[in-house]
Image: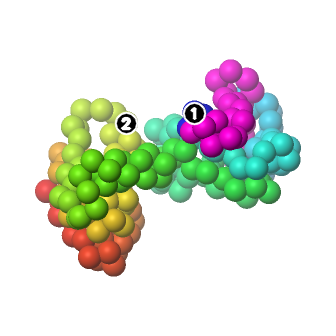
């Protein structure tokens, strides 16, 4: 993403809260007496004054799917930002990667609808989270025939699958789950 922003004339600045600098709290109403050094409200308001947009990559903590599936960190950034937020990756979606995947299919194989197979092994602990981002949603929105093959107990999120089905039907595609 940094290279892409640079190639388009932007000046990307990379900050890694919690990695190379401070840690951020994203929940409202939390007493800041733990391991977090700043609340996202202040961080984002200041950062948004310096930038035309903020690209945010969040990584699921892999602790609470019901909470993490709602993308609370991404939503906190959006709540406090005065500039657009670009989802670079979250627990549920990886839209820039999905767009790149669909562009690659179109560039390499043409614009006609394709049969797109999405599969994964059931051996990785992050599978429930990571499989959300390999977007069947993008393929469905493009009207492709989407085939999802997965081991038992590694199903995609129910709400995501409803959306995939709706978008596929609207675009003239299909969805098959094996």
Q: Earlier in the sequence, mark 2 or mark 1?
A: 1
Q: How many marks?
A: 2
Q: Residue furthest top?
A: 20
Element under disc 1:
helix
Task: Using the image, determine if residue 40 lies above or below residue 19.
Answer: below
Q: Secondary structure at mark 2?
A: loop
Task: State the image quarter where residue 162 is shown.
Answer: bottom left
Q: Is residue 175 magenta?
A: no
Q: Quadrant of the N terminus?
A: top right
At 13% from the left edge and 56% from the top edge, which residue is drawn? 178
Residue position marked by numbered label 2 in the rendering: 126
Q: Quadrant of residue 83?
A: bottom right
Residue toward you, 62 or 104: 104
| Res. 159 visible in picture | yes
Query: Magenta segment, which residues?
Result: 4-27
Residue 76 screen position, x and y as percent: 69, 52
Main SS category, magenta section: loop
Instruction: Inspect this view and state whether residue 31 appears.
Output: no
Task: Kindly identify which residue carries mark 1.
Answer: 3
In this rendering, position of residue 131 left or right of residue 24 = left
Residue 42 point in image, percent of width and height: 84, 44
Q: Is 18 included in the stretch rendered in magenta?
A: yes
Q: Is residue 177 above or below residue 60?
A: below
Viewer-nearest residue: 95 or 162: 95
Numbered tag placed on residue 150 in the rendering: none
- Give the left or right position of residue 15, taking residue 57 as reference: right
Q: Judge depth for marks 2 and 1 and give the one in front.
A: 1
Q: Residue at x 78, y 45 (%)?
A: 51
Q: For the residue carrying disc 2, how many other residues have a C-alpha within 10 Å: few (<14), some (14-19), or many (20+)?
A: few
What x and y, as percent, mark residue 67?
Answer: 53, 52
**Residue toward you, 81 or 84:** 84
Q: Residue furthest left?
A: 178
């Amino acid at each position: 993403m940094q290279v892409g922003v640079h190639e388009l004339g932007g000046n990307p600045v990379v900050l890694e809260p919690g990695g190379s600098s401070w840690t951020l709290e994203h929940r409202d109403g939390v007493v800041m007496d733990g391991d977090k050094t700043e609340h996202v409200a202040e961080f984002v308001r200041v950062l948004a004054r310096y930038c035309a947009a903020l690209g945010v990559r969040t990584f699921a903590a892999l602790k609470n799917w019901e909470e993490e599936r709602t993308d609370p960190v991404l939503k906190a950034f959006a709540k406090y930002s005065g500039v657009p937020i670009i989802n670079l990756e979250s627990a549920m979606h990886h839209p820039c990667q999905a767009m790149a995947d669909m562009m690659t299919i179109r560039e390499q194989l043409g614009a006609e609808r394709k049969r797109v197979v999405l599969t994964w092994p059931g051996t990785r602990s992050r599978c429930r989270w990571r499989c959300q981002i390999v977007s069947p949603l993008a393929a469905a929105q493009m009207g492709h025939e989407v085939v999802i093959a997965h081991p038992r107990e590694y199903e995609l999120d129910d709400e995501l699958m409803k959306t995939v089905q709706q978008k596929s039907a609207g675009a003239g595609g299909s969805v098959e789950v094996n």
